[in-house]
């Protein structure tokens, strides 16, 4: 016979998979199940931990244990940086993802803190400056409702952003159109970028900040943004909860052979 905690976990798993317990549904408090005769506190705790390890629920202090959303949030590739979104409108990148996913959003679901720091090796290489140079760090934590989805910290050379809204210490988004609109208004129109992605085990701090369930990896993003003449105007590091995003790219397939012929 299966242990009692396994039986309890399997019953909840079936209710989740059948839709009887929909995404966002709150599971009973541990004490409620103990009082209902479902087992000891240890039995219920083990059952909930099993459901969390299987990716069916999340458990956080203050929010209890809830069923995880099944549909991942679209994390657009090229489309999220469309200039028409931020230059001519106010659809910054994280909002573009929400719109494409058919999900609600509020601008204050992105926090912002700005500080002046010394560039470490990663940031220095990204911006093409010596290690230890002073740079501005614009750190954001993005949530969907109360659920954190990712962090993103953008680094800038002081000469590119000094005196702009990007370095305004007031918490909240950088303003209409976000950081790229600020750079555009300062004379630094973005032209192309490079993104590198890799998965890894989260740090203890990241587990707490992103409210990650046991065993969930993160996807780390490195984004380098250039003007048309090749000047790097932003280097950003993002940490994304792996299960909360579906990465989507839509691009024209290159043909380098034809390009070479055109240059001959």
Image (cartoon, rainbow, N blue to C red):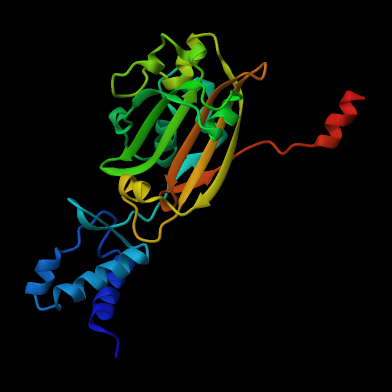
Q: Is residue 77 left or right of residue 20?
A: right
Residue 67 in the image: above or below residue 45 = above
Residue 262 in the image: above or below residue 205 = above
User: Which residue is at a point 29% across and 56% down the rendered structure image?
Assistant: 23
**How far from the left and from the top, in percent, is residue 13?**
30, 70
Q: Quadrant of residue 56?
A: bottom left
| 131 or 145, nearer to the observer | 131
User: Which residue is at a point 17% across and 50% down the rendered structure image?
Assistant: 62
Q: Is residue 1 left or right of residue 133?
A: left
**How far from the left and from the top, in percent, is residue 50?**
31, 70
Q: Quadrant of residue 110?
A: top left
Residue 175 in the image: above or below residue 15 = above
Q: Which image quarter is the N terminus in?
A: bottom left
Q: Is residue 18 visible?
A: no
Taking the view exactly as shown, the residue that stands out farthest to the right is: 264
Q: Is residue 34 visible?
A: yes
**How far from the left and from the top, in percent, is residue 217?**
44, 55
| 147 or 23, nearer to the observer | 147
**How far from the left and from the top, in percent, is residue 54?**
37, 66
User: Which residue is at a point 55% across and 35% down the rendered structure image?
Assistant: 122
């Amino acid at each position: 016979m299966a242990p009692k905690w396994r039986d309890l976990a399997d019953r909840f798993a079936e209710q989740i998979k059948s839709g009887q317990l929909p995404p966002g549904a709150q599971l009973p408090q541990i004490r409620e199940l103990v009082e209902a005769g479902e087992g000891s506190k240890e039995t219920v705790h083990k059952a909930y931990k099993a459901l969390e390890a299987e990716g069916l629920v999340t458990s956080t202090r203050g929010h209890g244990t809830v069923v995880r959303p099944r549909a991942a949030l679209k994390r657009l590739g090229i489309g999220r940086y469309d200039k028409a979104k931020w230059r001519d409108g106010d659809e910054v990148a994280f909002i573009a993802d929400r719109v494409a996913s058919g999900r609600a959003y509020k601008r204050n679901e992105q926090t912002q803190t700005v500080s002046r720091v010394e560039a470490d090796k990663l940031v220095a290489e990204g911006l093409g400056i010596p290690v230890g140079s002073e740079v501005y760090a614009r750190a954001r934590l993005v949530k969907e409702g109360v659920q954190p989805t990712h962090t993103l910290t953008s680094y800038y050379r002081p000469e590119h952003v000094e005196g702009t809204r990007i370095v305004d210490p007031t918490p909240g988004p950088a303003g209409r159109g976000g950081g790229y609109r600020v750079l555009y208004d300062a004379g630094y129109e973005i032209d192309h970028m490079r993104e590198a992605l890799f998965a890894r085990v989260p740090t203890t701090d990241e587990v707490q900040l992103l409210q990650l369930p046991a065993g969930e990896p993160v996807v780390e993003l490195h984004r380098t943004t250039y003007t048309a003449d090749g000047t790097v105007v932003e280097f950003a590091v993002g940490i994304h909860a792996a299960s909360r995003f579906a990465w989507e790219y839509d691009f024209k397939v290159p043909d380098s052979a034809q390009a070479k012929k055109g240059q001959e």
